[in-house]
Amino acid sequence: MTRISVVDDSTEWQRDLRLRLRASYAKSALGAEAAERRLQEVCAGSDAWTLAELTDAGTRVGHVAVVVADDNGTQAGRIVDLRVEALHAGRGHERVARDWAEKWCAERGATRLDVRLTEPAGELFAGYRVRGQLRAKRLGARPEPVGGATARPMTRAEYPEWLDAEKAAYVGDIVRSGALGRDEAVRKSDRDFAKVIPEGLATPDNTFLVLEAAGERIGTGWLKHRYLPGVTYGYSLTIHEEHRRKGYGLLAMAAGERATLEAGDAALMFTVWGGNETAMKLYTRAGYRVVEENLSIALPRCAT
């Protein structure tokens, strides 16, 4: 029978967690420096995490770590880590730990429980909803334009319309993923855009593109260079609705990769929101690996 008890000293576990995360990030497309930076971001606030030990008949078999914190006005729980030793895996300890984490977070006011996965977890979180994936690709040679299409810098006249469309699309992604309701998503969109591009088109280390083919504007792109050491973050590479399903998605990816290399970065990273299966398939075709997958479930969980 699995027993769970909170432990006071998490020093050894935190050291082990950092080693495992560092190895996972380093083997992705990020590279050593970017992996270290991502590790620091993920482990920020670790002093507030609660660690519980799993035992079976007095033998330690694994652990689970949790935290509850405010997320844009919502109390959200998070499973920071859930690990069962290989010798004891597959005996139900994982599910007991997951159920304990859900109950622990709900008792502390959480209305949602999140989990960030850097490795596959089988069916353990099958009832959870995919909120988003962080994907990345290490770039090689500069890709050639696709199908005669081109990418050029966005003009000041084009920027306001683009900004309105991007903010609306961001709200839609957040709502569709189940992360927030529409009103909260609108407020988050306003805050986030004001933070990341405070100077608009003139914000340093940002590239704003207009994609064109056969003399028509078919899409736009927005990239943040040196988001992590050597890594560009693609906030968006979008093909307009009337030009979709014509093979232009790979054009957008190629344009982003060229801009990344021209800015001196060696990898390109994106977040794809849950529910956007089309984008997930496109990124897979283009060679972008999953660095992290974020899942969530509403609390309290309905009995199954």
Image: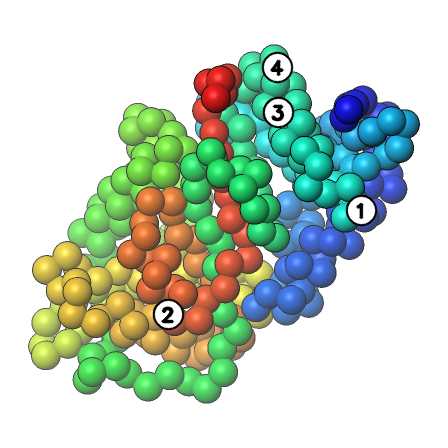
- Label 1 vs 4, first from the N-terminus: 1
- Sequence order check, earlier mark of 2 and 4: 4
Instruction: Check disc 2: other Cα within 10 Å, few if <14, some if 14-19, many if 20+.
Output: few
Between the residue at mark 1 and the residue at mark 4, the CA separation in whole angstroms equals 33 Å
Is the residue 119 above or below the residue 68 in the image?
below
Q: Earlier in the sequence, mark 1 or mark 3?
A: 1
Q: What amino acid is found at the position of numbered circle 2 in the picture?
A: Arg
Residue 39, x across and y down, in percent: 68, 52
Return the x and y of residue 120 as percentages of the image width and height: 58, 51
Q: CA distance from mark 2 to mark 4?
A: 42 Å
Between marks 4 and 3 in the image, the one whose residue lies nearer the viewer? 3
Q: Nearer the viewer, mark 3 or mark 2?
A: 3
Quadrant of the rendering where the N terminus is positioned: top right
The image's mark for residue 285 is 2
Q: Secondary structure at mark 1?
A: helix
- Contact check, label 1 and label 4, Cβ < 8 Å: no
Pointers 2 and 4 in contact (C-beta within 8 Å): no
Circles 1 and 3: CB atoms closer than 8 Å: no
Which kind of residue does numbered mark 3 sit on?
A: Asp
Taking the view exactly as shown, the residue that stands out farthest to the right is: 58
Nearest to N terminus: mark 3 or mark 2: 3
Residue position marked by numbered label 4 in the rendering: 108
Label 3, on which residue?
Answer: 99
Which element type, helix, strand or loop, lies under badge 4?
loop
Look at label 4 and name its amino acid.
Answer: Arg
User: Which residue is pictured at 72% across the width and 43% down the height?
Assistant: 89
Chain-order first, disc 2 or disc 1: 1
Q: Which residue is mark 1?
A: 87
The Cα atoms of the two marked residues, 4 and 3, are separated by: 15 Å
- Identity of the amino acid at label 1? Leu
